[in-house]
Image: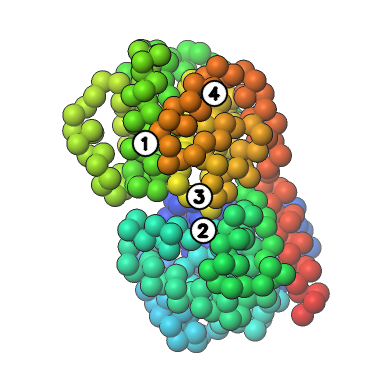
C-alpha cells in the first residue's frame, strides 16, 4: 500500500502533534513493507519540516512533501470547497489518514482520527475559528470517512452521539505515554528541581493548561481542605496560560503554598511527577488524558475523574472521583496519599499496558482491513 498521512499539525506542540509524530515514528519502525508519503502544509515552518523529514531519512519507505499551504487555505480548499484532492500533492495513494483541521478530498481509502469534542462540550474554551473549522471538517468526515479512529471508548461514544456515525465505522485505538517518560530516582536531581521551584517539602501536582475544563478552581479548594491535615503541603500547578477562570487573582497574590510554574520543560516535569505526594487530575472532560499515564510511569499515585475517558486510562490504578465535588476530590487525595506505594505499583502496570508500538500495530491493521474491503 501507499499510505498518505497529513503531518502538518506536528509543528504546534499540542496533543494532536504528539499523537501524529509518535504514530508516524512507530509505523515506520514496525512496517518495512508499505510506502509512506507524509504531507506537511505550511507557510512559515518549512525549516521545521525539513528538519523533521531529515530525522526520518533512515526509513527508506518514507517520503516527505512540504507544500506552501497555510491552515487557512487548507480549510478553504479542503473543508469549504472540498476541491484540490490530496493526490495533487502526494500522487496516487491507497490510504489517506488525517487527524486534525482539514479533511481533503481523495480517491484513496479515507481514515481519520478524532481526538475529542472539547470545542463543542466547552465552547467557551475554544476560539470561534476552531469551532467553525471543525464543524466543516466533521461534515466531510461524516459523509466520506471509511473508518474513524477514536482514541478512547468515550470519544467513540461522542462520535456516535454527535456525528451519528455508525459504530461499525469506528475503531478505538488508544494512545500511550511518550517513551522518554521514566521515573527519576536520583534524589540529588530531584532536590535540585524542587529547589528551583522553592519546594522544601511534600507537594501535590497538577499538570494542566489554565482553562475551565481542567477544573483547577476545585483542585485549589480541595487543596485548602487538605492543608488542615497536611499543613506543610504545597500545590504545584504546571502548565501554560489559558483562559481566565478566576485564577489570575490567585496568581497575583503569590500565595506561598501554591506554585504556578507556567510552561515546564520535560526534565523538570519528570522530576516533579517522580517526587509528588499525589498527582491530581480531576478534569471535566478529556479525549484521552495522557498526563495520567505520564504520572503513573513515574510512580505517582493518581487522583482523576470518574467521567469521560479518564476511567479507561486510569483503570484500577487510580482513585476516581466526581470532578464536580470538592469533597470527593479532597477525600480522593487523602486516599491516594495513604496508599502511595500500592497505587504506584498498580500505576506502573497500568501504564505499561499502553504503548506506541501497540498503537501503530492496531492503526496499521485498520489501514489493511479497510483497504482490503474497498
Distance in Å between CA atoms under marks 1 and 2: 23 Å
Residue 45 sits in which quadrant?
Answer: bottom left
- Measured as percent of width and height from the top left, residue 246 is found at 24, 42
Q: Which residue is mark 4?
A: 336
Mark 1 vs mark 2, foreground winner is 1
Under circle 4, the secondary element is helix
Name the residue carrying label 3. Answer: 286
Nearer the observer: mark 3 or 1; the answer is: 1
Q: Position of residue 242 (x, y in %)?
A: 31, 48
Residue drawn at point x = 56 percent, y = 62 percent = 158
Q: Determine the secondary structure under disc 1.
A: helix
Q: Locate residue 210 relative to residue 136 in the image: left or right.
A: left
Relative to 181, 74 lies left or right: left
Label 3 secondary element: loop
Question: Which one is closest to the eye, mark 3 or mark 4?
Answer: 4
Question: Mark number for residue 116?
Answer: 2
Residues at marks 3 and 4 touching, judged by CB atoms closer than 8 Å: no
Q: How crowded is the residue under tag 2: few (<14 C-alpha within 10 Å), some, or many (20+)?
A: many
- Residue at 34% from the left image edge and 56% from the top image edge: 125
Tell me if mark 1 has few (under 14), some (14-19) or many (20+) residues whose alpha carbon lies within 10 angstroms of its own.
some
Q: Of circles 4 and 2, which is in front? A: 4
Q: Are marks 2 and 3 in contact (CB under 8 Å)?
A: yes
Name the residue: 50% across, 50% down: 286
- Residue 68 seen: no
Q: Quadrant of the C terminus?
A: bottom right
Q: In the rendering, at what x and y percent does residue 332 appear?
A: 51, 28
Q: CA distance from mark 3 to mark 1?
A: 17 Å
**315, above or below 142, in the image:** above
Question: What whole-number distance in Å separates the C-alpha atoms at marks 3 and 4?
Answer: 21 Å
Gap between marks 2 and 3, in whole Å? 7 Å
* Residue picked out by circle 1: 218
Amino acid at each position: 500500500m501507499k499510505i498518505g498521512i497529513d503531518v502538518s499539525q506536528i509543528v504546534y506542540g499540542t496533543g494532536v502533534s504528539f499523537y501524529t509524530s509518535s504514530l508516524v515514528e512507530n509505523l515506520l519502525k514496525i512496517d518495512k513493507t508499505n510506502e509512506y508519503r507524509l504531507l506537511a502544509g505550511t507557510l512559515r515552518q518549512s525549516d521545521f519540516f525539513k528538519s523533521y523529514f531529515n530525522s526520518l531519512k533512515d526509513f527508506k519507505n518514507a517520503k516527505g512533501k512540504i507544500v506552501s499551504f497555510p491552515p487557512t487555505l487548507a480549510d478553504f480548499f479542503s473543508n469549504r470547497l472540498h476541491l484540490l484532492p490530496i493526490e495533487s500533492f502526494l500522487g496516487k495513494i491507497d490510504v489517506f489518514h488525517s487527524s486534525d483541521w482539514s479533511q481533503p478530498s481523495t480517491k484513496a481509502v479515507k481514515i481519520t482520527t478524532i481526538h475529542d469534542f472539547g470545542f463543542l462540550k466547552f465552547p467557551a474554551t475554544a476560539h470561534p475559528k476552531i469551532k467553525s473549522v471543525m464543524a466543516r471538517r466533521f461534515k466531510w468526515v461524516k459523509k466520506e470517512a471509511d473508518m474513524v479512529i477514536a482514541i478512547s471508548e468515550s470519544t467513540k461514544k461522542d462520535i456516535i452521539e454527535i456525528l451519528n456515525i455508525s459504530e461499525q465505522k469506528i475503531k478505538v485505538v488508544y494512545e500511550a505515554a511518550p517513551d522518554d517518560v521514566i521515573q527519576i530516582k536520583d534524589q540529588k536531581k530531584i532536590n535540585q528541581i524542587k529547589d528551583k521551584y522553592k519546594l522544601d517539602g511534600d507537594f501535590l501536582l497538577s499538570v494542566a493548561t489554565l482553562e475551565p475544563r481542567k477544573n483547577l478552581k476545585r483542585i485549589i479548594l480541595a487543596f485548602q481542605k487538605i492543608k488542615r491535615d497536611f499543613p506543610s503541603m504545597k500545590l504545584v500547578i504546571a502548565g501554560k496560560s489559558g483562559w481566565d477562570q478566576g485564577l489570575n487573582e490567585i496568581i497575583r497574590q503569590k500565595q506561598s503554598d501554591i506554585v504556578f510554574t507556567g510552561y515546564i520543560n520535560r526534565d523538570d516535569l519528570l522530576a516533579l511527577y517522580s517526587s509528588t505526594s499525589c498527582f491530581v487530575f480531576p478534569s471535566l472532560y478529556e479525549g484521552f488524558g495522557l498526563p495520567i499515564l505520564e504520572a503513573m510511569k513515574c510512580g505517582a499515585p493518581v487522583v482523576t475523574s470518574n467521567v469521560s475517558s479518564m476511567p479507561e486510562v486510569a483503570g484500577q490504578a487510580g482513585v476516581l472521583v466526581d470532578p464536580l465535588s470538592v469533597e470527593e476530590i479532597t477525600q480522593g487525595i487523602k486516599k491516594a496519599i495513604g496508599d502511595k506505594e500500592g497505587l504506584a505499583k498498580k500505576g506502573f502496570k497500568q501504564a505499561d499496558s499502553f504503548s506506541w508500538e501497540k498503537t501503530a500495530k492496531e492503526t496499521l491493521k485498520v489501514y489493511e482491513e479497510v483497504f482490503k474491503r474497498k
